[in-house]
Amino acid sequence: MISGATTAGLSTSLEDTRARYEARMNSAKKGFYIAVAILIVFALPLVAQLVPGLFGSWFPMPNSDHVETPYAVLGKIFLLLPATWLTVFFTKSYAEYFHLEREYAHKAALAKSVDGFKRQAPKYEEEITAEVFMEIRTNPTNRDGPEPASHPLYDVLSKVVSKILGKDNKKEDKT
């Protein structure tokens, strides 16, 4: 059913796909690190305002005559939203690329070893070939990937927004 040449070509193709997802996964990891750095930089003014004197002379102390309004704090919190979104985006991207890289590594390993399996159990050659073929042809995106680590601020904000909008976070039954 699957000859040696076809198996070698299939395993090479699957390995190439796995390598592409690994490169994308590494790019997402770098993007995540950059997003965390941006988030920290954007959070510094808010922390400096909420905890005066924490950074010494790096940030000026608030003027005792000037009272900060809650709107100023809220405005600085809104500055964190794009950086938080960027962090969430790269976290989810990394998790998805990790899932796809793992799936294609599994498929490549199966394709590389099908000939050895058939030699070890010649009586079950057709069943082995059919099972490997069925495993290789399944779409890896149909399987659930790992849940990415979530940002605590994002979780809190999504719950608040869900309550405000009256939406339930639970998945609805499709029946």
Image (cartoon, rainbow, N blue to C red):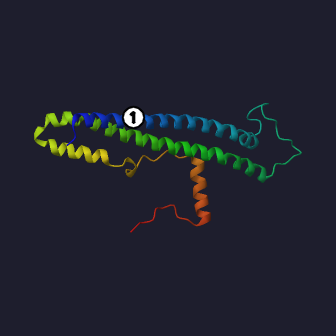
Q: Quadrant of residue 63?
A: top right
**Secondary structure of the residue carrying numbered label 1:** helix
- Whole-percent x, y for residue 101 in the image: 41, 39
- Residue at the bottom extreme of this rendering: 175
Furthest residue toward top? 57
Instruction: Tell me the quarter of the image containing the N terminus.
Output: top left
Tell whether 3 sits left or right of 66. left
Residue occupying the point 35% across, 36% down: 13
Residue 26 position within the rendered picture, expressed as x and y whole percent measured from the top left: 49, 34
Residue ID for mark 1: 16
Describe residue 3's horizontal placement relative to residue 167 as left or right.
Answer: left
Residue shown at 46%/44% (left/top)? 96
Residue 55, picture quadrant? top right
Indicate the position of residue 21 as horizontal and vertical percent values.
44, 38
> Mark 1 is on which residue type?
Asp
Between 16 and 94, the one lying in front of the other is: 16
Locate residue 13 relative to residue 83 in the image: left or right.
Answer: left
- Taking depth in this image into account, of 28 and 129 the one nearest to the observer is 129
Counting from the top left corner in percent of width and height, residue 158 is at: 58, 56
Instruction: Locate the C terminus by quadrant.
Output: bottom left
Q: Is residue 170 above or below residue 141?
A: below
| Residue found at the very far left of the displayed protein | 123
| Residue 20 against residue 172 in the figure, above or below | above
The residue depicted at 57 percent of the width and 47 percent of the height is 152
Specify whether 164 is left or right of 148.
right
In this view of the protein, which residue sits in the foreground, 22 or 115? Answer: 115
